[in-house]
């Protein structure tokens, strides 16, 4: 129940932050891939029946989120450890 509440709070805060940002479109060079890369994307598009690319995207983005969260946690912990106010060596 606590984790569920924390997830609700986190998604609410993340949604509020995203609402502050202006809507924008992807630049054209990111939308269209040049030459051979475009043909590779076209060939991969047919493999959607065998490989669940939607789930893979969610898994990869979740993994990246965990790594970034861990890095931010370590960064904050190191900053607090150097603060004399919190008992750090300064």
Image: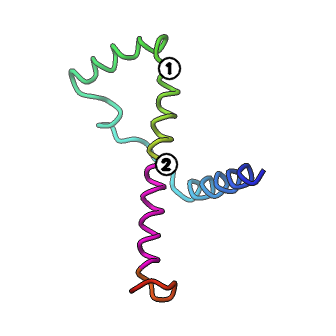
Location of residue 85 with respect to 49 vertically, above or below: below
* Residue on which the image places disc 2: 66
Q: Dot 2, how many residues are within 10 Å of its Cα: few (below 14), some (14-19), or many (20+)?
A: few
Residue 6, horizontal then vertical, whole percent: 69, 55
* Relative depth, front residue between 48 and 60: 60
The residue lying at 33 percent from left, 20 percent from top is 41
The residue lying at 71 percent from left, 51 percent from top is 3
Q: Which picture quadrant has residue 36?
A: top left
- Tell me which numbered mark, 2 or 1, is placed earlier along the sequence: 1
Q: Secondary structure at mark 2?
A: helix
Residue located farthest toward the right when viewing the structure as drawn: 1
Q: Dot 1, how many residues are within 10 Å of its Cα: few (below 14), some (14-19), or many (20+)?
A: few
Q: Main secondary structure of the magenta part?
A: helix
Residue 65, horizontal then vertical, whole percent: 48, 47
Query: Which colour scheme appears in the figure?
Result: rainbow
The residues colored magenta run 66-81
* Relative depth, front residue between 55 and 20: 55
Which numbered circle lies on residue 52?
A: 1
For residue 30, side relative to residue 12 (left or right): left
Q: CA distance from mark 2 to mark 1?
A: 21 Å
Which numbered circle lies on residue 41?
A: none
């Amino acid at each position: 129940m606590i984790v569920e509440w924390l997830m609700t709070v986190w998604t609410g805060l993340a949604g509020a932050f995203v609402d502050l940002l202006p809507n924008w479109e992807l630049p054209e060079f990111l939308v269209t891939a040049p030459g051979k890369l475009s043909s590779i994307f076209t060939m991969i598009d047919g493999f959607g029946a065998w490989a669940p690319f939607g789930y893979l995207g969610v898994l990869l983005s979740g993994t990246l989120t965990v790594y970034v969260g861990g890095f931010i946690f370590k960064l904050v912990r190191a900053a607090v450890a150097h603060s004399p106010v919190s008992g750090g060596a300064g």
